[in-house]
Amino acid sequence: MKTQLLYVLVSGTEDYYFEQAFVSAVSARRTNPDARIVLLTDTATDAAIGARGPQSGEFRALFDRIIPVALDAALPAMKRSRLLKTGMRDYVDGDFLYLDSDTLVAGPLDGIDAVPGPLAACADLHCRFADHPHRAATLSLCRKAGFDASGEEVYFNGGVMLARDCPQAKEFFRRWREFYLEGYDRGLHQDQPALAHANASLGHPLQQLPGEWNCQLQYGVRYLGSAKIVHYVCTNVSSGEERKLFVLNDPAVLQKVRSEGPGAVQDVIVDPFRGLASCARLSTGDDLHFFRTRRYRWLRSRFRRGRFSLLEFLLKICDHLKITKI
């Protein structure tokens, strides 16, 4: 495999990004033992890694190279992370396949060497932008960034991204960072609207990878069987009694990884399917869109098992009366 694997990490004791990256890198090394794996981080995170005791050496041993970049530690961690991500083409020599920390590598990735073009990524949520469940909200974010995305056919997910070491890719990343910083000044902290803006401004050089290269768990069920990279998305963390879709969405499990190391989830590293909730349901069409409405979120926030029993009973009676009347 000629294309190196690249992670970006900004983390401290108040988050679990280190633990996620640790698990992901173990999965990458397990399935691609000869791959060159690189970590791009900031000096503050690099120092924090060194203070993690025995796990520090185990973590560092997974990487062929660690690149610490001096960034102002007073900047918010998210901004430091985005500065590294949008600038990674300047910091890293050679072709690379970037992976978010909240991923699991499920198989060999050497096929990426044969992908043509300077840049490639998967469609966000595995659909055309016209069918995107969050289209309205995404358009609003893009407008806030100063970009009209309404004509885009594909809105790309930045969680897995191929970048060749070539002038076209370097210009792409330069614009990506420029547009990200412009959006940040307007109060927009996400980097994907700027990614779409950079792609459109350069005539859409970003090519679409097949979905198995970035199987976004909530929407990528059709790619689970062939997934090369499973992207469970760390923001899909549920609260209260709601079941987690994936085991690594559970802070309690990540705390166990912090205490015991990636071996605490070895079964999931070997087989990502084992991390899925034992009871889950697929939703499509209007059901899917209803779950994204404020009405659903309002009802869901007030739902507890048994709390709506009386309402369910009354609705059952109404249904029975309708049937009797017919």
Image: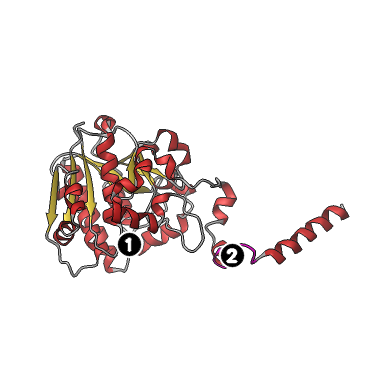
- Residue 26, horizontal then vertical, whole percent: 26, 43
Residue for point 56% across, 47% down: 281
Q: Is residue 27 left or right of residue 225?
A: left
From the image, state whether disc 1 or disc 2 is nearer to you.
2
| N-term-proximal mark, 1 vs 2 | 1
- Residue 37, horizontal then vertical, whole percent: 19, 41
Is residue 190 covered in magenta?
no
Count residues near mark 1 (Cα–Cα under 10 Å), then give few for <14, some for 14-19, many for 20+: many
Residue 227 is drawn in which quadrant?
Answer: top left
- Residue 324, horizontal then vertical, whole percent: 87, 54
Q: On the image, numbered disc 2 is attached to which residue?
A: 303
Indicate the colouring scheme: secondary structure
* Amino acid, disc 2: Phe
Q: Is residue 22 left or right of residue 277?
A: left
Would residue 201 be seen by someone viewing this image from the given angle? Answer: no
Residue 223 is drawn in which quadrant?
Answer: top left
In the picture, the quarter occupied by the N terminus is top left
Q: Is residue 99 left or right of residue 271?
A: left
Count residues near mark 2 (Cα–Cα under 10 Å), then give few for <14, some for 14-19, many for 20+: few
Which residues fall within the magenta stretch? 299-307
Vertical relation: 147 (above or below) 5: below
Would residue 231 be seen by someone viewing this image from the given angle? Answer: yes
Residue 29 is drawn in which quadrant?
Answer: top left
| C-alpha gap between disc 1 and disc 2 | 36 Å
* Amino acid, disc 1: Ala
Q: On the image, numbered disc 1 is attached to which residue?
A: 145
Vertical relation: 290 (above or below) 5: below
**Residue at the extreme right of the image, as rendered:** 325
Mark 1 in CB contact with mark 2 (< 8 angstroms): no
- Residue 203, horizontal then vertical, whole percent: 29, 45
Closer to the camera in the image, 10 or 196: 10
Vertical relation: 74 (above or below) 289: below
